[in-house]
Amino acid sequence: MSHHLLPIAHAAMDQHGAWRVPHDLLEHLTGVAYRAVVNAAPFGGEDWVRISAMLHDLGKYQPDWQHYIRKASGFEPEAHIENKGDHPNHSTAGALWAHEKLGPTGNVLAYLIAGHHAGLSDWNTENSNLEYRLGLPDSRTELDESLKGAPAELLNSIAPLPSLQTVPGTKNGFALWVRMLFSCLVDADFLDTEAYMNPDKGSERGNWPQLSALHEAFDSYMTDKTHGAAATTVNRLRADILMQCREKAQEAPGLFSLTVPTGGGKTLSSMAFALEHAKAHPEKRRIIYVIPYTSIIEQTADEFRKAFAAVGDEMLIEHHSNAEADPKVENSRSRLSCENWDAPVVVTTSVQFFESLFASKTSRCRKLHNICNSIVVLDEAQLLPPEFLQPILDALNLLSKHYGVTVVLSTATQPALATVNNYLDARKHIQGLDNVREIIADPDALYRQLQRVQVELPAEMNSHAPWENIAARIGKHENVLAIVNTRKDARELHQLLPKDTLHLSALMCGAHRSAVIGDIKQRMKDGTPTRVVSTQLVEAGVDIDFPVVYRAMAGLDSIAQAAGRCNREGKLEYGKVVVFIPPKDPPKGLLLKGTNACKSVLHGNSADPLDRKLFDAYFTKLYYECDLDKKQIRVDLRMDGKLDNTLAVNFRTAAENFKLIEDGDQVSVVVRYMEPDKEGRTIDYWLSTLKKEGPQRWLMRKLQRYIVRIHQRHAMPMLAHGDIKELVPGLFAQTADGIYNAEFGLQLDHVQLTPDKYMV
């Protein structure tokens, strides 16, 4: 190779097996710096990322590293995956140089540089220790060897040094700011590397339609939709809600709430607000729509795709566990965009959004800088998890004040998120969201106009009724939905109701649940008596409409969501919602706390249990009973103001603890529910494809519709009995024929089966 004296960053062969001109190292550093500066401009982090970019691959100037890159086969596929690859370490040299030469400023840069492959570290814990790593003799050797080959102009380019006085949000904002800087650096590094290694892939990025084009397509769609709607009171109110959203969008960016009863058209109205707000404020770059449940994300994304069809549906990406890739809804551009959220519209889950905000890994942090100057709609905001509420509120405040983010809290039951600092126990204080502007001019009047149900409360809040009594009452109704708190309760109640009663729970795979919901709608349309027993999964985004709904006592927000499945379209003067006390209280935890808070608030307020004012009292009581930072995230990230000159923050530990869903003790089981498709392919065909080709993203999405998540304590006995087997790490498949029931889904209680019940 003729470039043997030139320090290079990457080397690759072309399609004919000939060496391409290698990627000059200094050119790579300046290229990353340029991209990172563009990324950081929205929040003023340009100098920080410029310096970190120029130093991030200082270690590649080591003779050992240069020897390695020449000896290697060119492109190493795992070069940008955390903790992979066997090449000499190169990320400590720049970090150590900054740490030694630049004081506290250098410590910030050290976090960024040292983590640009492995992710952000803790400063000094048993879990992860950047301070220890910087002090290792090998790190000193790496730096000394690197400086021998580094050109003088590289280190001379470091000045001027930025000031720590410019940190957005000062001490409380330090950790989020570092993650934002980190995002700018690692995304720039990925993209500059990709531009050399895979120019075709790099050229597919960007060139998205402007939000203004989406605005026009959406307005046209909504005009057609409203003109075609029946002239009912509900549709008239939906049109008024839409108009108010468009008008309020002209106001200055910041924090907004959209308080609309269930069935009031919040989804499309909130998108109308976002598009209008982006038009009024041209600096807004994208809309991020955050949904609490994976089960409803696909239908929401499909609704938006219909609205944007005139522009083409490429502009929208879904980013959640089910949508890693699917040839039907993904193309190469949307798949690339999932990596860094550079599309104009992103539909994602609360888990993906908030865990990314507190992440330490490069793959998850990459997208953060693209949240700047966005409009974030939090759908069903009342479902923000109480045990992580304080760090979430901190992050939302920082995003709104310092990163140009407009936040919309969209819900029928607004949680009490304002600051509270008048408790005797200071640990119960909330540093909340203040100056939140309500989009609806008179929510109370709107609630009165959209009141479609009457709620019947139990005469005695602490008197448990046996299932037989509850079933007898429910069975008197031809069309009724009963919602209970646990899967066990659903089974017990279902067994006491007429044989044609339908059942819904999370032990049924997504495809099974969708089929049952389709059956419910068809039966109601045909006038066939329809009784349904469900767990609370039916309360989120499932568009079914019953004249009577029974709800086991739960949190007040759950009762309101249940009421949203009753007389949804206003065909009756009033639907009927009956709250009952089941034989047993819910299990300890959030469900029980919500139930107790609800009973307390409803005591003496039975005239209108869904009075909007009661929700503030309910959430205030619920949050008081919860530890709003149960995992001590604020302590790890020094968001409690206890940041000193060492800037010792536990990024890795905080990220590992910030898990909205504790999925470590759960496993995924692919069940045998799927009917053969048009080509005659069964679930066995797709499972054998998985065995041959491994867990490809599009295939995992296809299988996701047939997956049930269960606790390990249930999975291990099933594995021992041969009911399930592990296909790939963490993914199991049903092998016994009799353990998936057409009515109830996966059977967790092992039943002795004859040999013919097993499948190979």
Image: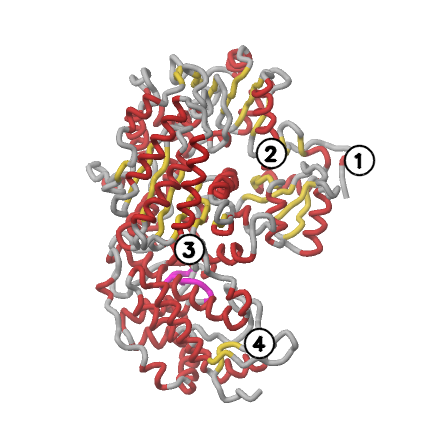
Q: Nearer the viewer, mark 4 or mark 3?
A: 4
Res 294 seen here? no
Mark 2 residue crowding within 10 angstroms, few (<14) / some (14–19) / many (20+): many
Judge depth for marks 4 and 2 and give the one in front: 4
Q: Is residue 579 left or right of residue 299?
A: left
Query: Is residue 26 shown left or right of residue 490?
Result: left
Mark 1, residue position: 756
Label 2 sits on a secondary structure element that is loop
Three-letter amino acid code of the residue under disc 2? Met
Query: According to the image, label 4 marks what residue?
Result: 12
For mark 3, what is the residue?
359
Helix, strand or loop under label 3: loop
Say whether disc 4 or disc 2 marks the residue closer to the N-terminus: 4
Q: Is residue 522 above or below residue 628?
A: above
Q: Position of residue 95 (x, y in %)?
A: 37, 73
**Nearer to us in this view, 223 or 74:** 223
* Position above or below: 488 against 571: below
Q: In this rendering, which labeled residue sits more in front, label 1 or label 4?
A: 4
Q: Quadrant of residue 251?
A: top left
Q: Is residue 580 visible?
A: yes
Q: CA distance from mark 2 to mark 1?
A: 23 Å
Which structural element holds mark 4? loop
Q: Nearer the viewer, mark 2 or mark 1?
A: 2
- Based on the picture, tell me whether residue 680 belongs to the magenta stretch: no
Amino acid beneath label 1:
Asp
